[in-house]
Image: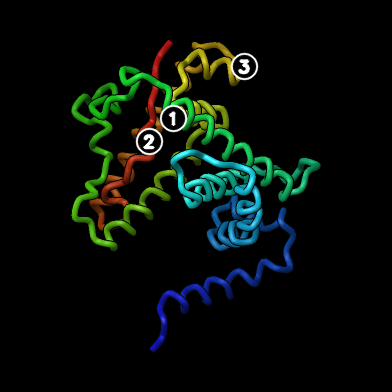
Amino acid sequence: MINTSEFFRDVAATQRLRFLDMTDNDVVQLAQAGNREATEYLLHKYAGLVRAKLKSYFLLGAEKEDLQQVGMLGLWEAVMDFRCDREVSFRCFAQMCVQRELITAIKAATRQRQLPLNSSLSLDACIYDDSPEKCLSDLLPCTRNKDPEDQWTDNESASWLRQSIRQRLSPFEWRVFRAYLEGMSYSEVADRLGCKVKSIDNALTRIRRKLAKVIIISETRGRGGDRRLAAPPALIMGAQHHTP
């Protein structure tokens, strides 16, 4: 009897073979153009780099797999942000991105443990200015009595949602968004990015507008029959935020 998981794993490995004779720069360009196999090839190729970096970091209360996910997110960002015209190899850039992602996650976790309860973001907070009935809790998937298939579709939709948001935000907006999710105040974000508080406020306004579009698209596609996008899980679970 054929083992289905092993079969598809072998197929995926075979598809990645065509990238072996290509340079990292060429594969990165394909990945940035939307080639999923190219992206998976790079993530698979440099997964060992992530594991090596994990040996230098520890986060109290977190499993090794949690930090590995953080590191893989940093690797994915390296694939998306790498500039082939720069005099630096993709490997070096990936190492920097993975390390930065791990340090950011550890600092964020430490900061969030120290935040008072009254600085937390309410699940009843409105997503859209013109639609007060839509709040953050609407994005939370119900995890009670969830079968494995539903859990898998949640993971798929979360990946789609994260990538859609990343593609729509400018590099500056993405940095503001990540800092916001870490629970930083407007002034703290401004200090980190070296800009005025007003610029952060304007960026968050644009980000909310773009997030609204992504959510609307996901809901529309979900109604159209793509079950993976029917109920996108929250990307901002547990994010805490406080204004200056």
**Which element carries disc 3, helix, strand or loop?**
loop
- Circles 1, 2 touching at the beta carbon (< 8 Å): yes
**Which element carries disc 2, helix, strand or loop?**
loop
* Res 112 visible: yes
Q: Based on the displayed image, in which of its 4 quarters is residue 212 positioned? A: top left
Which residue lies under the disc numbered 3? Answer: 194
Nearest the viewer among 73 and 231 is: 73
Q: Residue at x 52, y 16 (%)?
A: 188
**Which element carries disc 1, helix, strand or loop?**
helix
- Earlier in the chain: of badge 3 and badge 1, it is 1
- Earlier in the chain: of badge 1 and badge 2, it is 1
What's the amino acid at mark 3?
Gly
The picture places residue 160, in percent across and down from the top left corner, at 41, 49
Q: In which quarter of the image is the C terminus?
A: top left
What's the amino acid at mark 1?
Leu
Mark-to-mark CA distance, 1 and 2: 7 Å
Classify 105 as above or below 114. Answer: below
* Res 206 visible: no
The picture places residue 234, in percent across and down from the top left corner, at 33, 40
Horizontally, residue 204 falls left or right of residue 26, namely left
- Earlier in the chain: of badge 3 and badge 2, it is 3
Mark-to-mark CA distance, 3 and 1: 18 Å
Q: Based on the displayed image, in which of its 4 quarters is residue 15 positioned? A: bottom right
The picture places residue 75, in percent across and down from the top left corner, at 60, 48
Which residue lies under the disc numbered 2? Answer: 236
Which residue lies under the disc numbered 1? Answer: 181
